[in-house]
Image (cartoon, grey):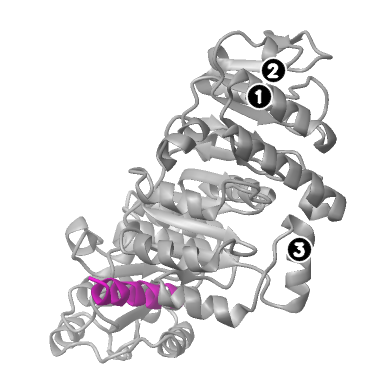
Amino acid sequence: MDLKQQLKPFFEPETVAIVGATKGIAFGAGLPLCLSENGYRERLRLVNPREKEIIGLPVYPDVEAIPGKVDLAIVVVPAPICLSVFQACARKGIKAIILEAAGFSETGPEGKKREEELKDFARSAGIRVIGPNCIGLVNTANRFISTQVPQESLTPGPVSVVAQSGVFGNIILDWGPENGIRFSKVITIGNRMDVGELDLIEYLADDPTTKVIVLYLEGVQNGRAFLSLAARVSRKKPILILKSGRSEVGRKAVLSHTGSLSGDDAIFDAAFRQCGVIRSDDFYGLFDLARAFSVAPLPKGKRIGIITSTGSIGVQTSDACVSQGLSIPDISERSRNEMKKIAPAWMSIRNPLDVGPSGLFGDGMNVILTDPDLDGIIGIPVLPSFVAKEFVRQGVPPTSLVGNLSKELLGPGGKTLLLAPIGNRAWIEILREAFGDRVPIISSPENAARVMAALARYREYLEKTK
């Protein structure tokens, strides 16, 4: 059986058993109701010898008492009894298990021994396992979940995430929708007893609903295999990574969190560059990258134009761009002539283009978006929220505040535009609602410079590896 078929029950199960389902206050207690509400009620099989009924569904005393076939078991029982559950699953013919229990290699030698026993048994029985010490996965395409998530998190999107930390998975599912990130799949792998990042990168490479692959790892299982696979997949889809454990303190924390060994960071950096993987230093930067790679066309070069309503931020952004290997050339003569027709006498017409309080940000954006001497644009619109709201109240479309951001200008083959607005949440939400999936909204101008550089480097990688 090929990898896609092996992993299919995790993402597209026909019948799901929750082993350890309970009415009490416990980890995973709300999962039966959540799955029921997402259309899985008729496919749920609940197991707990101490319960008779949960949410109106019958509860079976053990796995083998379930009638008919079971595709996937979600196991939420204490670690010491997991082996007996695995044995029952094997006798039932279940070939996929999400093991959400903790208490394994992350806890020390005894837990590591317990995990090895489970691993050996699963391998001998032909069972694929995600976990332990995880929350499993979310597939927005069919609304399948193995953890409780807000309903708004299930709006399908182009970003798929593989995270070693279960809580990290929950965090982004809560945080993402409110910050313009929509997911295709989120998979947490915990201690990676069996299914790991290599399996999932391979799977997501051919997943039609995944445009961008995001990884949060605390260590890499097999360095050579990772490099080979990432180099191949990066030519098809961008792979973005946040790898923790940079410092000695961080490496020790990683070992106690998921039992991973995190090696020398400089080696990881060099390896990622070699295989086209784009690395982020922090959480917000990671998802700034995800926004941009899922929406923006890649810049044709490194010539970047900056337009801003505040000169000081324009200067800082210029410095950030140059430090990232980008260039800030003068705008073309045509662009200067266009701006001179509308600019007040005090405005300096150059790159960065600082329009100040002139109200000409949108007009300036229209000019530099069509400048033939620029490959990408970083826009930094600054506007008090009460002014933005007044524009909206008067029926002025918010898009007019920042320019004519048409699909022709920003679609495939068009100009790369990143917006890094400064202001309160209301102003940023106005922009996000106005532009939807057409323009990435980046968390800061400095991060916009890092993202633009990453887009440019990725294009270079693709051209070099054709």
Q: Is residue 401 magenta?
A: no
Between the residue at mark 3 and the residue at mark 2, the CA separation in whole angstroms equals 33 Å
Horizontal and vertical percent position of residue 240: 47, 64
In the image, residue 287 sits, relative to residue 64, either above or below, namely: below
In the image, residue 378 sits, relative to residue 337, either above or below, namely: above
Q: Which mark is residue 89?
A: 1
Q: Amino acid at mark 2?
A: Val
Badge 2 element = helix
In the image, residue 3 sits, relative to residue 461, either above or below, namely: above
Horizontal and vertical percent position of residue 293: 37, 62
Q: Amino acid at mark 1?
A: Cys
Horizontal and vertical percent position of residue 380: 41, 73
Q: Which residues are magenta?
A: 450-466
Question: Looking at the image, which is closer to me, 254 or 194?
Answer: 194
- The residue indicated by pointer 2 is 63
Toward the front, the furthest residue is 124
Between the residue at mark 3 and the residue at mark 1, the CA separation in whole angstroms equals 30 Å
Q: Amino acid at mark 3?
A: Leu
Q: Are marks 1 and 2 in contact (CB under 8 Å)?
A: yes
Crowd class of label 2 (few under 14; some 14 to 19; many from 20; radius 10 Å) = many
Q: Report the residue at 68% width, 71% height from top.
A: 245
For residue 199, say whether it is visible: yes
* Sequence-earlier tag: 3 or 2: 2
Horizontal side of residue 357 vs 170, given as left or right = left
* Sequence-earlier tag: 1 or 2: 2
Main SS, magenta region, reads: helix
Q: Report the residue at 43% width, 84% height from top.
A: 314
Q: Are marks 3 and 1 in contact (CB under 8 Å)?
A: no
- The residue indicated by pointer 3 is 255
